[in-house]
Image (tube, rainbow, N blue to C red):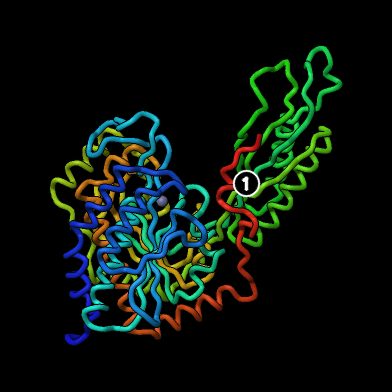
């Protein structure tokens, strides 16, 4: 394969040549943590970098101000590489320390590693672009800057807007404590607000006049608790009360609000379950003589795994070899674990994988694909993309085994050398997998046929209705 310009050595070389610049990009994004749909500075940082690389930039993709597209090349195949960059509330944390120390108390932090995710995916796209340009290879590389993975589901809106419709293969990764191809399906989820309105009055002197919206919220929860016995065991329904109607017990609560999340291994079942939850809400309103208004608050489809692409990705991860951590990486990870992470947390971070992995401080191998496809009881907006385009993802070890997502421990490791090594390995994996698809379009045909077969007679209907935008979801009612 010496004359093959898409060979692995060339990919590795191109990624390596750029890795200092993209590690620095990841660090800059780490330092300006921005919440879902507010990632203006993180987007500007990435666009500046990718524009300099020679990508054509499209802003406002899918009508989202912090979604963008960086594109290079022409014609097919079209390879989409997905990036994220949103942070999480309250997780502000100093880098590289062994105790919880916020940079700014109450501020946001990169507790899910999306600084690495975005920069690593952009690095993969940039390396591929260079190979295509140098060797005059036809094909299109697109980096999709996807906002709001943590809240709102940017990719769900982008999918609804059709921005993935012409893509042949989509690739993504996520920083993790292990390195493996992401082989599971996930749960589809639909979020929905229930807003009850009743009538306020003095709770002692004229209670018969009042109609309590808070009662309706409580009765709805009781009704849903009874429903749980009679729903599929792999479905999930959870809620939060977002407005109790006030602090005063002597005022009958005229307004109260809850948000529910309804999840199921497939979108159609999640919708059916949602209809049952809505009936319970109506029942609660009827019982309390209140009214109820319902508003969809986001949603994502289940992931449709693609075994064809998973196998190609795994082969490339194995050929590349796992990230090579050094003594200093092990030293910091070991101390962090000893001082701040319990045994129980360590086991939870690797479950449902082999518990013996626990003995590794940093995971320096690539796990095989499980024999049987499993469901991860979580949700990602990559799910929506996977219904439209054959999609593959991987996890890459960037953090000490035992690190839980959405914790200060994840933030403090987010710009350490180990995290950079993981990010570079992820970029190599994505670029090499994409190169394999460009070199051998039969893989794309097989991956598409697999997706078609898996979908069968189902149809993708976006879980967020056509008239709902992110601004609606964040709007708090009066
Ligand atoms: Zn994440």
- Residue 342 visible here: no
Q: Quadrant of residue 455?
A: bottom right
Residue found 60% across the figure and 62% down from its top: 462
Q: Quadrant of the N terminus?
A: bottom left
x 52%, y 75%: residue = 451
Q: Residue furthest left?
A: 327
Which residue occupies the extreme top position in the image?
205
Name the residue nearer the viewer: 105 or 234: 105
Q: Position of residue 195 (x, y in %)?
A: 70, 38
**Is 363 in front, or is 136?**
136
Which type of secondary structure does the marked residue at label 1 adopt? strand
Residue drawn at point x = 59 percent, y = 42 percent: 475
Residue at x 44%, y 77% (from the top left corner):
168
Decide if residue 230 is on the left or right side of residue 306.
Answer: right
The residue tagged 1 is 237
Is 11 situated left or right of 34 in this image?
Answer: left
Would you place residue 424 above or below residue 288 in this image? below
Q: Is residue 287 left or right of residue 443?
A: right
């Amino acid at each position: 394969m010496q004359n093959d310009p898409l060979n692995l050595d060339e990919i590795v070389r191109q990624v390596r040549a750029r890795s200092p610049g993209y590690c620095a990009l990841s660090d800059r994004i780490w330092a300006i943590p921005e919440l879902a749909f507010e990632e203006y500075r993180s987007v500007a940082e990435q666009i500046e970098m990718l524009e300099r690389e020679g990508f054509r930039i499209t802003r406002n993709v899918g009508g989202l101000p912090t979604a963008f597209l960086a594109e290079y090349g022409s014609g097919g195949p079209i390879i989409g590489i997905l990036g994220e960059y949103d942070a999480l509330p309250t997780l502000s944390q100093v880098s590289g320390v062994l105790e919880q120390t916020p940079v700014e108390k109450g501020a946001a932090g990169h507790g899910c590693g999306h600084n690495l995710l975005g920069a690593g995916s952009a690095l993969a796209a940039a390396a591929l672009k260079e190979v295509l340009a140098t060797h005059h290879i036809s094909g299109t590389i697109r980096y999709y800057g996807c906002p709001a993975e943590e809240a709102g589901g940017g990719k769900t809106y982008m999918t609804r807007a059709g921005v993935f419709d012409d893509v042949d293969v989509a690739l993504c990764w996520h920083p993790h404590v292990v390195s493996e191809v992401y082989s599971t399906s996930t749960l589809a989820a639909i979020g929905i607000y229930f807003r009850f309105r009743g009538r306020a009055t003095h709770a002692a002197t004229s209670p018969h006049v009042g109609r309590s919206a808070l009662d309706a919220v409580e009765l709805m929860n009781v009704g849903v608790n009874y429903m749980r016995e009679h729903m599929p065991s792999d479905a999930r329904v959870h809620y939060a009360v977002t407005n109790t109607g006030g602090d005063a017990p002597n005022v009958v609560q005229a307004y109260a609000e809850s948000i529910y999340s309804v999840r199921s291994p497939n979108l159609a079942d999640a919708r059916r379950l949602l209809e049952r939850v809505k009936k319970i809400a109506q029942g609660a309103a009827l019982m309390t003589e209140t009214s109820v208004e319902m508003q969809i608050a986001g949603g994502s489809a289940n992931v449709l795994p693609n075994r064809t692409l998973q196998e190609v990705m795994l082969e490339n991860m194995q050929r590349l070899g796992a990230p090579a951590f050094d003594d200093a990486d092990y030293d910091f990870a070991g101390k962090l674990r000893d001082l701040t992470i319990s045994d129980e947390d360590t086991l939870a971070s690797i479950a449902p994988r082999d518990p013996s992995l626990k003995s590794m401080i940093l995971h320096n191998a690539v796990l095989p694909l499980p024999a049987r496809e499993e469901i991860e009881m979580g949700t990602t907006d990559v799910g929506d993309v996977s219904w439209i385009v054959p999609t593959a993802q991987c996890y890459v070890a960037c953090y000490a085994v035992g690190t839980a997502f959405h914790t200060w421990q994840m933030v403090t490791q987010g710009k350490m050398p180990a995290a950079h090594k993981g990010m570079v390995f992820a970029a190599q994996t994505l670029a090499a997998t994409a190169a394999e698809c460009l070199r051998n379009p039969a893989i794309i045909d097989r991956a598409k046929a697999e997706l078609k077969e898996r979908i069968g007679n189902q149809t993708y209907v976006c879980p967020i209705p056509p008239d709902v935008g992110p601004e609606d979801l964040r709007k708090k009612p009066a």
